[in-house]
Amino acid sequence: MTNGASDSASRETVRRCRAVLDAMAAGAPEPADLARFRTDLGTLPAGDPRRSELAATMITLLTDGGGAPPTKVMADLGPLLDMVDSAPPHLLAWPQAQASARAFQLALDTQERRITAAAAGAELDELAARHGDFRPTLNAIETARKGIKLDIAFQRGDDSSKHGLIDQMGRMLDRIGDVPQAGPLRDIQAAVHELLDAHENSNWDAVPSLLARLRRSSEAAGLDPAGFAMPPEGEAMLKLLSDSESGSDSESEQLTTEEILRRHVRDGSGPAGKITAASILMRGWRETDPKPIELAIELLREAAAEPGPMRDVARHGIAVYLMRRAEVLGTLEGLDEAQEVLEDLIRDLRDDRGGSASPLWSDVHELLGHIKRRVGDQEGAGHVSFEAMYRFAHKALMESDPAIAREGLREAAALGMQIARHRVQVGDLRGALDALDAGRGLMLFAEVEMLDLVPRLRVAGRDDLVLRWEEEGPASPGLRTEAIDVLVNAAGGVDKLLKKSSPADIRAALRTVDADALVYLVPTDQQQPGLALVVPREGQMAYLPLSYLDVKQGAGAGDYLSALSRLSRELSPVAQAPFTDRLDNLCDWAWRVAIGPLLERYFARDAAKRGRVPRIVLVPMAELAAIPWQAARNREGTYALELAAFSLAVSAREFCANAARPPIRLTSTGLVVGDPDTAGSARDLPAARLEAFEIHKAFLRAAKYVGRRPSGTVSPSGPGTAAQVRSWLAADAPHAGAVLHLACHGQFSSEKRAAKASLVLAPDSAGAPGGLGADEIVRLLHSTPNRQIGLVVMAACHTGRSIHGYDEAYSLGTAFLAGGVRTVLSTQWAVPDDATSMLMYLFHHYLRAEKLPPWQALRAAQLCLIRPDTPMPETMPAHLRELAADREHTGVVGWAGFVHAGH
């Protein structure tokens, strides 16, 4: 082209670019116009002052002179900045516009892994220091910074922040009121929530219709629907995921290799297309021909060579497919490369992806552990596999929404049990113990750790986060993740916060509380037997295979579990019959599959030497946590309780922490709560108030009695409001006493969005509800570190049942333990009224009159109901003596529901 023609072409290019700028100045940028502008501008030679001026002008327009640009133009800012060689003198707002554009370019580069979050943060600090006096630019910089933090939260699987961000949209709509766009915008909010739920629950079939709904609502709201479009490789991957969940063959898997490559590996498809093609080539893991497997590996190597968020996924996939190829070929070939790829990925996750906070952390470590077992490195496999468990502890700390945390932790105990079984097979019982313990009680662990977060942030020099925590609240999207990063880094890793308990620690704790062994009960899975992992007070750890320890196959155990929640304390014997029958059948099964072999193998021979029956602290995993093991019954009709004493623990970690607390002397002072008037939120419990009144009169005379007296009148000391119980829990004066007896209602719900465990008490004078929840109990007790409470007795329904799944063990009972209470008695179901009254009186008799420790007092009381010939205390009130005369008909349901935990 001649110089004249070239000049003419460049003038035409400049003319088109100026026309776009004029259009931009009159309205919002259109992506197509901006794309043409960039293309045209790219034809001008570098160093051409017109190119620099036009690019700078466009950036100034897009940022409105230094403010925040529209989200949809973020990808254009970097290329435009690269075209600006010098600042045009007539653009007075250029320094601010450049700073704003650079801030958002940093946010995008962080998201695309072109720069680390730390490096981006440092540059944002410099930009803020230079432009802090211009509020729009400073706001833009802080918006970009918040975007980086949110992206970090999202990369780490902080699902609470994702939902929280969408909830912010709802609050914004509440503020702007009823505008024409409000309806479509609210539908966008609802659909995005549903989309997140679909992702979290692997409901892939729902995704296409939700995206279509989002596109329609976006158009109705006047927004660009392109953000909710899905490329072909995304649609193909969704179909694969959906077919994998349903177990059906994917249509894509019927394609030839050439068709797969033509559809998904094309110009512009990028790493996502190659990853999708590789997944299809593997035919849902059923491919046995080495050629397509090799091709899939090569595609993933190409995808891993490209920077961006898909690189980690591709590297993980390489290791997966190398392992599959080794399985198909029956060799170890390629597994050394798989290990190198995974170890390199782990280094990157640790250095720049938040370490154990990364959603990939567990998968990568679990896969590396599997490969190490395959090549014979059992010690290395144990270490790496256990590292996988730290992801769940980090997840528990990170999530601010308990319902979301519960969903994210569903696999924690399952993975812990899987690792434990592997470690037992190679004789690594300590490794099995660590794996089991790391998957238990994580939400309770996080609840306690978060209580000290603010002072620990101050110690770490992060007053800025403290200020945000106080102003924005802990549910502010991304804030909790950032704060937990500081907490974890200050501790030296989440493993330091989790505080593993060694066998020596457990033995010391057993000696402190006079127990003989801590026993983990692990159910069977599809391929391996169950087991009991035993840490004895003296001697070496041991394990016992339990081949039939399967709740799903066990004597109607499933029916028992489903009936458990329907049992109420006031039901008549006829109404109780279905549950009672299932429970009775369960007793024989519990002996046969676990307790019988356990007692006969480890505890039968040393009873005489001990001078008492053995005391066993149980940590039952999964559904085993709902089984009343003390009611296991042998062929002669003897219950396990007659041969041993049983306590429960959340985990070895929690057991050791509780045992380390100094004992508290129990006296007759404290607080007794007797059937407070709940103003209709729960039915009256006249037997409970009589029970509480008699216990107060006979054993806790110096205690304050609140609630209702047997006559139905309110106690002079108060009606038993939540405020009164809170006040007593927080009172650190010695005269407050160390015993709390609760004869009231307990509420229990394990529904995902309404999970709660609370005591139902009397409303206060202002009519506020009389509930006292488990989480509030933990916080309240922790806020009064000098409070010394030795015993909490809850004669309320379901106070020992976990609201967040069996292995979280998050209940009213464990909340008191986590708050520092030494001993707790709670219930696994709604124990019938008469049995509760007898049992509670007998417990306090053996505790106070016979001077037995709480665990022995409970066992002695339960034995009284099992053995009709046991003499009743002479001080027992007449109405209870009448009940006791017929106690042989009480049955298992009347005594086995009460459990002991703690000292």
Image (cartoon, rainbow, N blue to C red):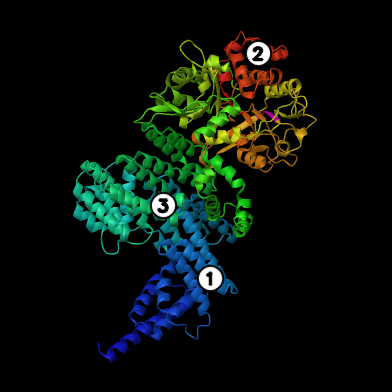
Disc 3 residue type?
Leu
Disc 1 residue type?
Glu
On screen, residue 264 versus residue 181, left or right, reads: left
Residue 501: x percent and y percent?
Answer: 52, 37
Instruction: Farthest residue to the front: give it.
Output: 539
Report the span colored magenta.
739-744
Q: Which residue is mark 2?
A: 883
**Disc 2 on helix, strand or loop?**
helix
**Disc 3 on helix, strand or loop?**
helix
Residue 186: x percent and y percent?
Answer: 51, 55
- Which tag, 3 or 1, sits closer to the chain's start? 1
Sort mark 3 into few (<14), some (14-19) or many (20+) by Cα contacts within 10 Å: some
Residue 873: x percent and y percent?
Answer: 69, 13
Disc 2 residue type?
Leu
| The stretch drawn in magenta includes residue 526 | no
Which label lies toward us, 3 or 2? 2
Closer to the camera, 524 or 245? 524
- Which tag, 1 or 2, sits closer to the chain's start? 1
Q: Is residue 628 above or below residue 469?
A: above
Cα gap from disc 1 to disc 2, whole angstroms:
78 Å
The reply to whether residue 520 is visible in this rendering is yes
Quadrant of image for the N terminus: bottom left
Identify the residue at image location x=62%, y=52%.
454
The numbered disc on residue 210 is 3
Residue 238: x percent and y percent?
Answer: 34, 50
Cα gap from disc 3 to disc 1, whole angstroms:
41 Å
Q: Are marks 3 and 1 in contact (CB under 8 Å)?
A: no
| The stretch drawn in magenta includes residue 742 | yes
